[in-house]
Image: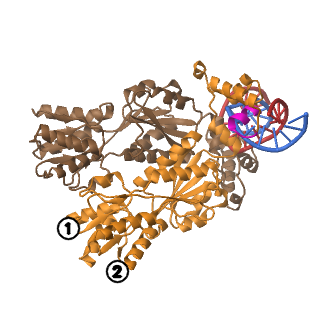
Chain colours: A orange, B brown, C blue, D red
Amino acid sequence: MPESVRAAVTIDDVALAAGVSRSTASRVLSGAGSSSTSAGARVRSAAERLGYVPNPLARALARGEGTRMVLGVSGVSPDVHDLYLGLAMSGVAEVCAPEGVGVSVQWLPLEAPDAPLARLAEDRGVRGVVLINTTERVLDAVPVGLRGRIASIGVGSAAVPSFDVDNGGAALAVISHLYLTGRRRIAMVTGPAWLPCSRRPVEVYKSVMQSAGLPDRIVPGDFTAASGHEGALEILRRWPDTDAIFGICDATALGVLSALRGLRVDVPGDVAVAGFDDIPFAALSAPALTTATHPVRQIAAAAAGAVLDRTAARPTSYPSRLVLRESA
Amino acid sequence: MPESVRAAVTIDDVALAAGVSRSTASRVLSGAGSSSTSAGARVRSAAERLGYVPNPLARALARGEGTRMVLGVSGVSPDVHDLYLGLAMSGVAEVCAPEGVGVSVQWLPLEAPDAPLARLAEDRGVRGVVLINTTERVLDAVPVGLRGRIASIGVGSAAVPSFDVDNGGAALAVISHLYLTGRRRIAMVTGPAWLPCSRRPVEVYKSVMQSAGLPDRIVPGDFTAASGHEGALEILRRWPDTDAIFGICDATALGVLSALRGLRVDVPGDVAVAGFDDIPFAALSAPALTTATHPVRQIAAAAAGAVLDRTAARPTSYPSRLVLRESA
DNA sequence: CTGAAAGCGCTAACAA
DNA sequence: TTGTTAGCGCTTTCAG
């Protein structure tokens, strides 16, 4: 491609080479409007030959779209070390790149998500928003300006399509496994109370325990390993005969493991431990962590895709798979 | 701000409200060109009052800039689960967001980085590139079109400013610690041979061993935990009296730890283990991993900042800090 | 120092 | 189906 050496070939060059007007070229190249097959062929071949690549900025400006997909992350404070966020970004970025859109992250304070959301809605550079760790507060604060170009990884609403892992199914699989392998005094370290999607697993846990006629043993956590560590300590203090601990996520479960190790409690001999997410390090702990998969990247990609397509996507739930290792 | 309800306020609105021409408004708002103090004040106050926010797309189109910062990642294949990449993205995204630029990721195949790089250079939507896991091959393939808007996290060149952690210093700190705590039969699991920045630590290791009159024990790895696991096995097979293993990164060191555990080798009693990066899970392993910090996010942010500023940044090295835990 | 005018590259009515 | 005509919102010569 010798012409690629020269500067930017525009749609005018293509139109000229194909012997049609700029509009016609635009129609066939952008796929909008109708055009004759012959014109279409000529334009396409000219574009191919010249190595034409549409300028995403010009296109976006003309269409009134943005070129930035923003990940709106709720939380008490920005948590940049969250590896869940890294995966989500990567999934979103992959889907957005072909369209020439990049991704950025915007923290949404738990108690005041309105202002940042409003700003995103007015920013002409923003193509759409993918919510993460979504709360009802955020759902209520979604400005009309974002309608049709917003999706949520987590809970959704009438106006915000939801894409999420089957939290309930995953929790059920893990807890059932614990139960079916003979555990009866099962405890759980939960996620932050403000996070809706961390409530499902707790409900499932409660209902399983209840239908088995067992009392529940719940301790609050916040998705961190530290909370798992302290949670395990508290559990063993309050209910010394506990024989299994379910961590709401792998980080928490890993924290549980480290606490039990400190206490010289045998895992899974005395206490079984299970988590959720199947992060890479779940396979490396001692003992290796039993958990359930969480296809974050795939989910994030789907959410971003829905926003890009502006297609009225319906809520989608992704399956989780139990991963049996040594800890339970 | 009642006017924020209405649609996009443009620079024309501001100019009108300030009683100046659009050009003048543009000059003061974009900081380019000169303008009288009085005009400046009027424009600024009008902009403030109307809640004016420049449209990043229009600005970029007019200036001939892009709105996407791409992370060019070298590797044998796209590794989306790399948590190093997540941190880098997050650092770059934070710096780019205020400018209205988003980030995306482009894999650069080891043997053929030229085509993707050329494509990036010609893509009018691309603001600049931040290289990661940079190789000499990539450095050589940087198209002129990218000059002045590219930086590297890792090795650099005359045309590509480098931002990196002080790999040599970090390795020296870790190895010295091993030596000073009495270890003499120290082995190392390295990173992939194609990665320049993973060579420094190896050189440091070799030179330390040599000046101590000790033979080196090197086994190749690839930054994965799996390679650490196998590396440790091989080390103990070849040199059964090894009393310390330095993993090129924490993931690898964690793999080493899991292998030693399987072998029932006492750590740090029989063998000390140390890594590099200080990832969150380094504190959770059993025993907790001794390592050295690696401010990836900060480095990535600096690299992105340099690209945005188009400022001729000189190579910058970031210090690493030794983190003593239980494994060594 | 300031304003008028000409684009940046593309899309989208509107007629023909 | 096609071409013509206006923009999208901002920057930037170029005169004054």
Residue A108 location in percent, x, y? 52, 60
Number of marks:
2
State the residue position of label 1.
Answer: A265
| Left-right relation of A12 to A56 | right
Q: Is residue A284 visible?
A: yes
Magenta residues span A23-33
Q: In which chain is the residue bearing label 1?
A: A
Chief SS of the magenta region: helix
How many residues crowd around disc 1 within 10 Å: few (fewer than 14), some, or many (20 or more)? few
Q: Which residue is at a point 47% across and 67% down the rendered structure image? A: A195
Residue B63 location in percent, x, y? 63, 35
Is residue A327 found inside the magenta-colored segment of the image? no
Q: Secondary structure at mark 1?
A: loop
Q: Secondary structure at mark 2?
A: loop
Residue A27: give its label.
Answer: none
Q: Quadrant of residue B79?
A: top left
How many residues crowd around disc 2 within 10 Å: few (fewer than 14), some, or many (20 or more)? some
Q: Which residue is at a point 37% across and 76% down the rendered structure image? A: A209
| Left-right relation of B309 to A30 | left
Residue B161 location in percent, x, y? 42, 32
Disc 1 marks which amino acid? Val
Q: Which residue is at a point 30% across and 53% down the rendered structure image? A: A283
> Which is more N-terminal, label 2 or label 1?
2
Residue A215: give its label.
Answer: 2
Q: Measured along the vertical axis of the image, is residue A250 above or below residue A207?
A: above
